Image (cartoon, rainbow, N blue to C red):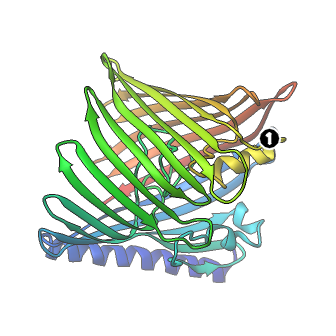
Amino acid sequence: MDKLHLMKGHKAFTSIIFFTLIITSASGQMKDKLQVGGYFKLMQITSFGDDIENTQWDYLFHNRVNMKYKFNPKFKAALEFRNRIFFGEAVSNNDDYGEIVDVDNGAVDLSWLFIDADDVVGLIQIDRAWMEYRSDHWMVMAGRQRVNWGINLFWNNHDLFNTYSLVEFDYEERPGSDAIRVTRILGDEHWIEAAVKYPDSDSTGVAALRYAFNMGRYDMKLIGGWYENDLVGGIGWEGNIKDAGFKGEAAYFHPRKNENEGVLSISISGDYYFSNQVFVTAGYLFQDAQSTVENSDLIIARFSRGLSAKNLMPFDHNFIFNVTYPLSPILNGSLMATWSPGFDASFLMGSLMYSLADNWEIGAFGQAFVYNDNSWNNPVNSIYLRVKNSF
């Protein structure tokens, strides 16, 4: 990294920290009205394939600021954004890296590159900007928000408004949508909600209803509406079988303008807490009418890009298993594995999280993709080391 770009990165880093400190200080002066939180992260990323000698080293500085302002008991607003500075071999080896990360799928582009150099890229993205009105029986929220209709922990085919990828572990907040949402409370555990996502093109608009009610020991949800180029209808449930959690989502997507066959997507999961605090989740996802996967490059791309509620994985049949365990009061471990028998492919991710102090955390994460094509192949591996400070 040359001196000029190093100075730009240093100035941007200093400005981000200075701005965050000012906002945090202001919240202390207006604690009854303004709430401010967020974090700083510094992460090293090591990537390699079958040949470990061809290793790539990258770095990410990530700052997030969450602000909420309460005008009165019924009205409040929020603004949340993240600042990221990328540097390392991925930036240096890709002339278009700034264009790759500077993507905003909302109706309004709220993403800005403040550094776009050969070896460092800086990006500001606003992913929450909303106002809310709430009374005893009504809630209205307008603006960039997360419309969270999913039930399962991992695969959510009811997540019509803002689908996310399994591989994006460092984005806990998940994407938002430019939408209007209206909720009417009809009674205890009984309500109806309508949401409309403003389209940024002819095919990305979403308008749907969700009706929630209780049936015995289960919370039930029905959805229906217009999803991009499809009509969609579905059912979801959440309850228990004895001491184990049991959840599911089923949705059918039918094309509105052509004669293509519809897509049925079903995801179910079970979870259980053991007495030693081990938490286990197992799930299954079925999607019919999916495109044929021909090579590992396409699979890897589909894991993180081009996802939709009706296309959560590159394969028809998918299984997932996840286990988390507190190894000590300050050390937590987890392991997740997927398996898709049609292509005999698996995605693996593990983590270790260590609490250094009340607001400090250090973590190690690993990801690997493997598949069997007459022999086992391991084309993608990544190791992440991250330090996080929350405020």
The picture places residue 251, in percent across and down from the top left corner, at: 52, 41
- The residue carrying mark 1 is 292
Q: Judge whether 198 appears above or below 341 on screen.
A: below
**Horizontal and vertical percent for residue 305?**
66, 55
Q: Nearer the viewer, residue 181 or 370?
A: 181
Task: Using the rendered image of the protein, determine whether residue 278 is visible from the camera's viewpoint.
Answer: no
Picture residue at 60% right of the left edge, 39% below the top = 264
Relative placement, left or right, of 124 versus 310 is: left
Rendered location of residue 308, percent (x, y): 60, 52
x, y percent for residue 131? 29, 72
Q: Which quadrant would the C terminus be assigned to in this image?
A: bottom left
Q: How many marks?
A: 1
Which residue occupies the extreme right position in the image?
374
Residue drawn at (35%, 45%) of the image = 356
Q: In the picture shown, does residue 142 fall above or below 190?
A: below
Secondary structure found at label 1: loop
Q: Which residue is at the front of the view, 261 or 40?
A: 261
Above or below for 258 versus 11: above
- Location of the N terminus by quadrant is bottom right
Q: Can see residue 300? A: yes
- Residue type at mark 1: give it: Thr
Observer-nearest residue: 46 or 189?
Answer: 189
Which residue is at the front of the view, 294 or 332? 294
Direction from residue 186 to residue 353 in the image, left or right? right
Q: Is residue 155 above or below residue 333?
A: below
Q: Residue at x 42, y 54 (%)?
A: 388
**Label 1 packing within 10 angstroms: few (<14), some (14-19), many (20+):** few
